[in-house]
């Protein structure tokens, strides 16, 4: 009898993943993890995860999750627990001009990430074109691609506070375009779009009969007294899907709690909405303890104080996040050949390395070299679908002092770095 083991054929990833990228947890992050296993301490400024930087979970939220654990072990309705759906409806009812929400237009999800995936699977047909910002939060491009669509990137203009270039956006529309993705406040640029610009985006969507997909996960994280305007408030006549959640606003990324609300006319979109319901049903429901967190975070006066007001304290002048933002923006702008549009929202800075001063051909190599030499982990700009290798993204979550030292080390590194 031949005892040789049969040769195992190669097991390959699906070809659908060929152009799907998520560099935030890509090869440079893998190398950082290997260095950590060898005992090297790495300052991880690559991912917007508040907990490792000492942000604690709001007690009233944890308390409700703990108290309801013994009744949270069953599936919920695929839209969500009725009380979580109600909590989301009340949240938006308190936002001036936000269109009224209907229960079956609300979906709880395992973070906004899952809701983005569900939406793309339900909406995007092979060859459909979806307008996505450049730079973007790369999950959008990845999920449009995985769904068989083409992410067509519209330019955000660094010289105009990173606002979307509306002429560029409109010029990219073809007869295959079906939707526009808007990320506001923006990751990675920190831009918060003014109302007139949002009205301009709505006008484009109106003219070309496009659906709006609006990622507003940073909606309560703004600096300098800037107020966030939800796009749905200026587009009540358009099919608009708005996304938010607890990962950032309540610093609860690990609870995987997010929501999606659908506003505007839906008669023309019943088929898509059936598809969205189908996608929600196939994953049965969002994790129920996470939905309990949504109830606690969005309901009741005391819990709202924990969740939302304290974010206001962190972002107000003198607040922890505001001080971190200040030290990063000012340190970057003081470096030779580096400039940074001051972030007005979210948790990131996206500085530019002037190509006249820093001749970077490969920005992924740059962040790998920074990791090896300074043990600081960033994400390169092309990882956010930015077309040229001249930007980096820096997370603003550490304390001011830690970030100040990191910026000093980064500045010294860049001063002598050649490719
Ligand atoms: C713009 C944007 N959208 C969505 C997400 C994913 O959020 P969640 O933790 O709710 O899945 C993130 C996370 O960083 C983000 O920056």
Image: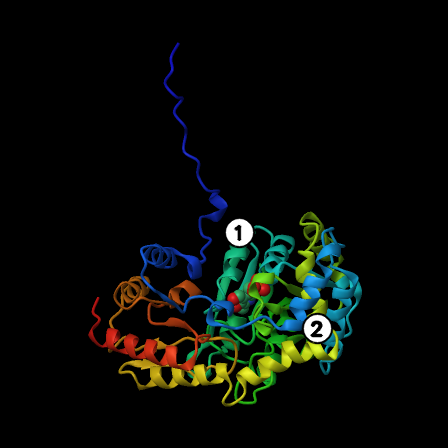
Residue 130 position by quadrant: bottom right
x, y (%) of residue 368? 30, 62
Characterize the local packing of mark 2: few (<14), some (14-19) or many (20 or more) Cα atoms within 10 angstroms: many
Q: Which is in the foreground here, disc 2 or disc 1?
A: 2
Label 1 C-beta lies within 8 Å of the nearest ligand 1 atom: no
Label 2, label 1: how far apart the Cα atoms are: 33 Å
Q: Residue at x 63, y 63 (%)?
A: 257
- Of residues 219 and 297, the one nearer the viewer is 297
Q: Which image quarter holds the C terminus?
A: bottom left
Answer with the quadrant where ligand 1 appears in the image.
bottom right
- The secondary structure type at the circle numbered 1 is helix
Q: Is residue 240 visible?
A: no
Residue 114 position by quadrant: bottom right
x, y (%) of residue 338? 31, 80
Answer with left or right where residue 125 lies relative to residue 370. Answer: right
Q: Residue at x 37, y 86 (%)?
A: 330
- The secondary structure type at the circle numbered 2 is helix
Residue 310 position by quadrant: bottom right
Q: Is residue 374 visible?
A: yes
Q: Name the outermost residue toward the top.
A: 1
Q: Residue 379, relative to residue 99: is it above or below?
A: above
Question: Which residue in the structure is indicated by mark 2?
Answer: 298
Q: How is the image coloured?
A: rainbow
- Of residues 53 and 98, the one nearer the viewer is 53
- Of residues 130 and 43, the one nearer the viewer is 43
Q: Residue 217, relative to residue 21: is it above or below?
A: below
x, y (%) of residue 151? 51, 60
Count of residue discs: 2
**In the drawing, what numbered circle is on residue 146?**
1
Q: Residue 62, relative to residue 150: is it above or below?
A: below
């Amino acid at each position: 009898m031949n005892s040789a083991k049969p040769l195992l054929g190669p097991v390959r990833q699906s070809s659908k993943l060929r152009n799907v990228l998520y560099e935030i947890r890509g090869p440079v992050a893998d190398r950082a993890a290997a260095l950590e296993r060898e005992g090297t301490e790495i300052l991880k400024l690559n991912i917007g995860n508040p907990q490792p930087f000492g942000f604690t979970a709001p007690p009233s939220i944890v308390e409700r999750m703990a108290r309801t654990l013994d009744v949270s072990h069953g599936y919920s309705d695929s839209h969500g627990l009725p009380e979580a759906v109600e909590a989301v409806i009340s949240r938006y009812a308190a936002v001036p001009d936000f269109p009224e929400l209907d229960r079956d237009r609300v979906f709880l999800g395992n973070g906004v990430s899952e809701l983005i995936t569900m939406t793309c699977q339900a909406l995007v047909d092979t060859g459909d074109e979806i307008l996505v910002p450049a730079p973007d939060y790369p999950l959008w491009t990845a999920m449009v691609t995985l769904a068989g669509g083409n992410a067509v990137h519209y330019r955000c203009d660094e010289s105009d506070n990173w606002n979307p270039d509306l002429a560029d956006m409109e010029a990219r529309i073809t007869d295959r375009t079906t939707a526009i993705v808007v990320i506001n406040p923006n990751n990675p640029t920190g831009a918060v779009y003014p109302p007139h610009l949002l009205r301009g985006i709505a006008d484009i969507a109106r003219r070309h009969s496009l659906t709006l997909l609006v990622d507003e996960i940073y909606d309560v994280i703004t600096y300098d007294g800037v107020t966030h305007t939800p796009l749905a408030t200026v587009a009540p006549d358009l099919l608009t899907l708005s996304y938010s959640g607890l990962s950032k606003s309540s610093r609860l990324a690990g609870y995987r709690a997010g929501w999606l609300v659908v506003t505007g006319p839906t008669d023309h979109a019943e088929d898509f909405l059936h598809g969205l319901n189908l996608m929600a049903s196939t994953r049965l429901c969002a994790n129920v303890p996470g939905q309990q967190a949504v109830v606690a975070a969005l309901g009741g006066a005391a819990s709202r104080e924990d969740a939302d007001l304290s974010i206001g304290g962190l972002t107000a002048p003198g607040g922890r996040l505001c001080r971190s933002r200040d030290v990063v923006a000012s340190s970057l702008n003081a470096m030779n050949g580096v400039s940074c549009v001051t972030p007005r929202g979210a948790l990131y800075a996206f500085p530019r390395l002037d190509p006249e001063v820093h001749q970077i051909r490969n920005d992924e190599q740059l962040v790998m070299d920074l990791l090896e030499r300074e043990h600081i982990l960033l994400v390169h700009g092309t990882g956010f679908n930015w077309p040229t290798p001249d930007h980096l993204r820096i997370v603003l979550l550490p304390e001011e002092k830690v970030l100040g030292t990191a910026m000093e080390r980064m500045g010294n590194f860049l001063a002598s770095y050649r490719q």
